[in-house]
Amino acid sequence: MAGIKVFGHAASISTRRVLLTLHEKNLDFELVHVDLKDGEHKKESFLSHNPFGKVPAFEDGDLKLFESRAITQYIAHRYEGQGTNLLQPDSKNLAHYAIMAMGMQVEAHQFDPLASKLAWEHVFKLIYGLTTDQAVVAEEEAKLAKVLDVYEARLKEFKYLAGDTFTLTDLHHIPAVQYLLETPTKKLFTERPHVNKWVAEITKRPASQKILQ
Amino acid sequence: MSYTNSVSMDDGNMVFNLMPNADFGYKVHGDPFSTNTRRVLAVLLEKGISYEPITVDLKTGEHKRESYLSLNPFGQVPVFEDGNIKLCESRAITQYIAYVHSSRGTQLLNLQSHKTMATLTMWMEFEAHQFDPFASVLTWEQVIKPIYGLETDQTVVEENETGLENVLNVYEKRLQESRFLACNTFTLVDLHHLPNIQYLLGTPTKKLFENRPKVRTWVDDITGREAWKLACDHDKSWFGK
């Protein structure tokens, strides 16, 4: 598909959320690299793309979007007919849609703040030459454990977070989960059997593998 | 109009009362002072939909107890019930109501095209991820902490006001091109901002909104809406129901 551009960084959690969606949909796109270390995202040339100075920025023809979860939702709806269906199977059922929407809010407000902090401490700080703060890690892990207890209960009832099929709700978790699986925080996922199974399923998907390359 | 307006005379002023007149058996578990609860009430009132308010006593920690956790395992208000469906997360609830009742009351979406909906979704994300982190901390420090007898941390207030100023600078520019944030009509995007803005207008942070002319007009517009004023009137919107 001509005209799709992503301005971001291939290692960034939020950029990866968008790349995953594009891969799931088999869409062609151009990734324009934005150098975060250099502060490129705060410079005038990038701010014209995203006034909040955050990656990723996205273009599809003359549509310009920011905020990874708005971009993924646009792609899932606009390209509903192709590639993986990332919405509920009965896409007109508003109650089912609400369950998916709720799951997306839970990822954004309950899971991601903790997962991002942990990824920052364990992974990204080291890239910037800083040291992991173990006290912060302990604190955030304690909170994440509670969130994952809720996920464990949910995943006992359903194969995926919004029901029995893979949706955007699950996809939004993948980039942070992939990073945390390479750190000591991995244990929080592996010691919960249903969470562990879910994590294995969502990370082995071909699209999930593609973004690691 | 799909809702009934009743007109009463009060000292010679005409007072329009929004009277919700559509009953779908909805329940809202929450606290009428909670920002997240008010976000949901605002949508129901804009749509002219009645609801049964069920108070969750935050001060005594009812939201963290077993009976409430069975409604929302994250122990937060509000929870919305539509028959068998229980929803938590205020922004998922508001979207559900806005979609299900798209043709009733105030139109809160912009359903013209994938493009217009994507823009609306993006601005909802901006509210949630750029505006709310600063605004909710400022509300917590200056409004909620004093209620619980805790002391406002002025350093935290200063830091978050700086963050909020950067966000409002972006909003000021946007509101030069667009009457409301997502488009030229009032939508869920603007509504989602109301609970924190309302509280912050009662604090020194008010000046950040007043110093920016387009933001100031927008704030006056959205806080002046009848449904919003009703949402903030806990006698009419909660205890008196």
Image: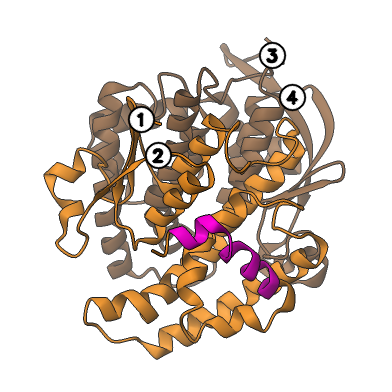
Chain colours: A orange, B brown
Name which of mark 3 and mark 4 comes first in the sequence.
Answer: 3
Q: Which chain does the residue under circle 4 lie in? A: B
Tag in front: 3 or 2: 2
> Is the same chain shared between marks 3 and 2?
no
Tag in front: 1 or 4: 1
Q: Verify CB contact (< 8 Å) between mark 2 and mark 1.
A: yes
Tag in front: 2 or 4: 2
- Main secondary structure of the magenta stretch: helix
Residues at marks 1 and 4, CA–CA distance in whole angstroms: 49 Å
Query: Relative to the observer, which residue lies in front, B160 or A154?
Result: A154
The residue shown at (45%, 29%) is B222
The residue shown at (34%, 63%) is A11
Q: Position of residue B63 (x, y in %)?
A: 71, 65
Task: Look at mark 1 in the image and give the residue it sits on.
Answer: A2
* Residue stretch in magenta: A195-210
The residue shown at (55%, 65%) is A111
SS at badge 2: loop
Q: Verify CB contact (< 8 Å) between mark 3 and mark 4.
A: no
Name which of mark 2 and mark 1 comes first in the sequence.
Answer: 1
Task: Look at mark 3 in the image and give the residue it sits on.
Answer: B5
Q: Verify CB contact (< 8 Å) between mark 1 and mark 4.
A: no
Q: Where is residue A48 in the image (x, y as percent from the top left)?
A: 19, 38
